Image (cartoon, coloured by chain):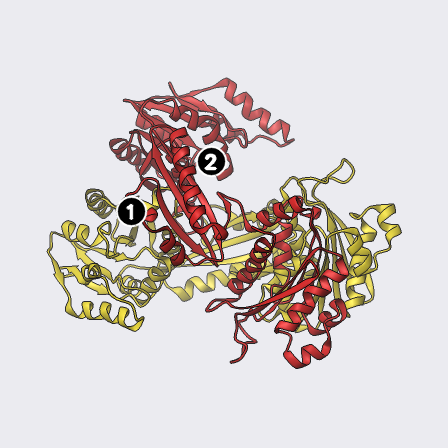
Chain colours: A red, B yellow
């Protein structure tokens, strides 16, 4: 099996100014080709340290993925360090220089003379074209090991990796396949899911299944290793079916699908429209719904009735109910949902009122207490939730996601 | 000067499942003591690799910060690897065992026998207490070098670092002080700011000033190195004053203050109230405003009038204007702001209408075109913006932030 090592170059990765995220993304991509990453080193912009890191990593791994240090300025040393490590001179590539010049002309920008250095490569190395910036990547080989240098800017690196590095690595003999898939769940606790899945989550099993919980959402990661991709894909699908059979109702999507996206698809499929009336979530629920491109097809309107007057005036919440039960109460959530439905004409409407904190809590109505009303098909239901213990952001997030999940369940999953 | 090296241990940091964020946080903390980080290595749960990483790092640095691998299971090897590297046996600490047992008793949980291993330390090493979990940290010395092993869980690591590791490092001779501060700006481009700052941003200057731009916001980082903290603090303050003199109007805050927080403070100070009417931002502006605890003091209400009917019905936008100018137009933004002000009684009101994309653009009204109306003091002004080229999320974010910044400028910075 091919093994990889990642080297990230740059002072900015060592002074707390930037979190190094490239290596995690690259690891995931490499696993798709069955390639494990044996280590990551973050190295400063210093010639000797960079050359030494190439040396050390080449003793462990077959493929070295190097990011950063390809810019035009004096502290960009990857190009020269690779030449030094390979013991090859740097050579000017006229065609590359032309491309860099074109990059600036197309954007109507002047090209600094320092950018010329980016047209130099160690002798015998190949160019990895950069469609998103001026810094070309470099691919070199030495004693059967492969060296891929890419820019540190994540967007440029990702495009270059997918277009040029991945095909090159995949063409090497000896790579198997590791596929990953996610199952996204809401409304069932992590430990309950683990209990229902039982031996499926055993360590050492292939596919390996892990769970991660965040604000009421549980994400199951399935990692399947096999000789080839189609075989790994079959294993993933088989596990997906097994899992959906065990915890079906709580599964709302797969891989990178979000809950607002899942709800959007359901509403479009059923030709239904939606409106929301928010107090404690303060626009977050509407924001989540309208994050989705094309949401204007089903989302009609939202109200952020943050004070009592707005609730009474905009949504016809009876002021007597607020006086009797308080603004954070079951009847007010109901009236908000019904007001939003009546005024917008939407098929479905949500009303949310609660105490997000950190202030405003009381013994009977603590921070985290949230009432949600759901109007659908001429009827309104309400539910009480206590999202505890957690901060303002978490209470608001969980309240909004819980409302979305209720819509999902109401529409028959 | 003392130099540091960070080693992060764990397979989960090498299979794309988790982004390693601890080292960036630790780097920032070390810089406060004037200590530079020379490198970071991410190492798998393998005995030989861990021991080798201790060896390699100790040749470069004086202080080694090690995270992860202190749990109770078989793949947690940091404890034994440190003992092997130090050439010391592991010894049972009875008092530590008692504390771990108490941790479980207090939580009413059974203690697995595997947790016993966490009470063993290499001979001569000191315990770093863990107030948030069961895994104690370890502090050892060898040949004048310092080894601090902490848990990988960020919350446990941070508490342990601040309570025990930082004081220990600070007590070493030879540490200076490096302080960092941020100046947050909006409404002035990064290159314009750089031009106005001139030599202040020169490389090699102390304090060192860097800029980073994100969605219309520019953040200036000031890093001052001095013999002691109060001296560094004075250098920071002097630079802050210089910079505010040069780009004053664009500065909205310092360090971690956000634009919604700055606007909230201004509104509270001036006893003014706010309402918003949103179309393309779909609740994002209201969400940003209500992210701030205590925003109910000045935020009255928001409308997400996502379709035309809602604009006409809820905010009295004349339907003739929508027909004549389109929903994304100057008059509609004006009418939305005025409608929100009239209905809520707020002193200030914002109306936003635009095309967030990816669909819905046209030649005359492309994706990124946004109109904002601002009602204040009986008058309404409007502005046209073209946030190009960028995606749906960026257009929405920039539109909401631009509206907030306009409020700031309107209130006299």
Dividing the picture into quadrants, the one containing residue B145 is bottom left
The disc at residue B311 is none
Viewer-side residue, B399 vs B195: B399
Pointer 2 residue: A73
Q: How many residues crowd mark 1 within 10 Å: few (<14), some (14–19), many (20+)?
A: few
Disc 1 versus disc 2: distance between alpha carbons? 48 Å
Taking the image as shown, residue B35 lies to the left or right of residue A308, namely left
Q: Residue at x 30, y 71 (%)?
A: B108
Asked if one can make out residue B40 in the rendered structure from this viewpoint, the answer is no
The verdict on a common chain for dots 1 and 2 is: yes
Taking the image as shown, residue B161 lies to the left or right of residue B100, namely right
Viewer-side residue, A37 vs A222: A222
x, y (%) of residue A109?
62, 32
Asked if one can make out residue A221 in the rendered structure from this viewpoint, the answer is yes
Q: Eyeballing the image, is A321 above or below B101?
A: below
The disc at residue A203 is 1
Q: How many marks?
A: 2
Label 1's element? loop
Taking the image as shown, residue A63 lies to the left or right of residue A73, namely left
Q: Residue at x 35, y 26 (%)?
A: A83
x, y (%) of residue B360?
72, 40
């Amino acid at each position: 099996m091919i093994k990889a090592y990642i080297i990230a170059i740059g002072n900015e990765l060592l002074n707390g100014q930037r979190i190094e995220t490239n290596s995690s993304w690259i690891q995931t991509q490499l696993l798709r080709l069955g390639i494990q990453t044996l280590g990551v080193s973050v190295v400063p912009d210093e010639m000797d340290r960079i050359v030494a890191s190439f040396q050390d990593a080449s003793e462990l791994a077959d493929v070295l993925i190097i990011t950063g240090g390809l810019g035009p300025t004096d502290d960009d040393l990857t190009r020269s360090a690779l030449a030094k490590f390979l013991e090859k001179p740097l050579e000017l590539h006229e065609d590359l220089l032309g491309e860099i010049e074109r990059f600036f002309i197309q954007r109507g920008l002047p090209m600094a003379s320092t950018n010329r250095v980016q047209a130099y490569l160690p002798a015998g190395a190949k160019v990895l074209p950069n469609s998103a910036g001026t810094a070309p990547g470099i691919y070199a080989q030495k004693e059967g090991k492969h060296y891929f240098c890419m820019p540190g800017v994540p967007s440029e690196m990702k495009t270059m990796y997918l277009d040029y590095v991945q095909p090159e690595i995949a063409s090497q003999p000896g790579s198997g396949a590791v596929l990953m898939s996610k199952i996204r769940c809401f409304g069932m606790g992590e430990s309950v899911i683990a209990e229902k899945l039982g031996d499926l989550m055993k360590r050492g099993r292939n596919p390996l299944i892990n769970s991660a919980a965040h604000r009421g959402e549980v994400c199951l990661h399935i990692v399947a290793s096999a000789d080839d991709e189609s075989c790994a894909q079959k294993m993933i699908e088989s596990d997906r079916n097994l899992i959906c059979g065990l915890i079906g109702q709580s599964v709302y999507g797969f891989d990178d699908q979000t809950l607002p996206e899942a709800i959007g698809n359901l509403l479009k499929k059923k030709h239904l429209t939606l409106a929301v009336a928010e107090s404690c979530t303060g626009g977050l629920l509407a924001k989540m719904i309208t994050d989705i491109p094309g949401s204007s097809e089903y989302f009609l309107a939202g109200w952020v009735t943050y004070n009592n007057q707005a609730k009474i005036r905009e949504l016809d919440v009876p002021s007597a109910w607020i006086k009797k039960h308080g603004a954070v109460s079951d009847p007010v959530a109901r009236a908000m949902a019904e007001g939003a439905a009546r005024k917008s004409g939407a098929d479905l409407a949500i009303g949310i009122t609660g105490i997000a904190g950190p202030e405003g809590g009381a013994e009977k109505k603590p921070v985290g207490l949230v009432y949600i009303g759901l109007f659908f098909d001429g009827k309104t239901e309400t539910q009480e939730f206590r999202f505890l213990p957690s901060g303002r952001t978490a209470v608001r997030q969980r309240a909004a996601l819980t409302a979305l999940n209720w819509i999902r369940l109401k529409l028959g999953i």
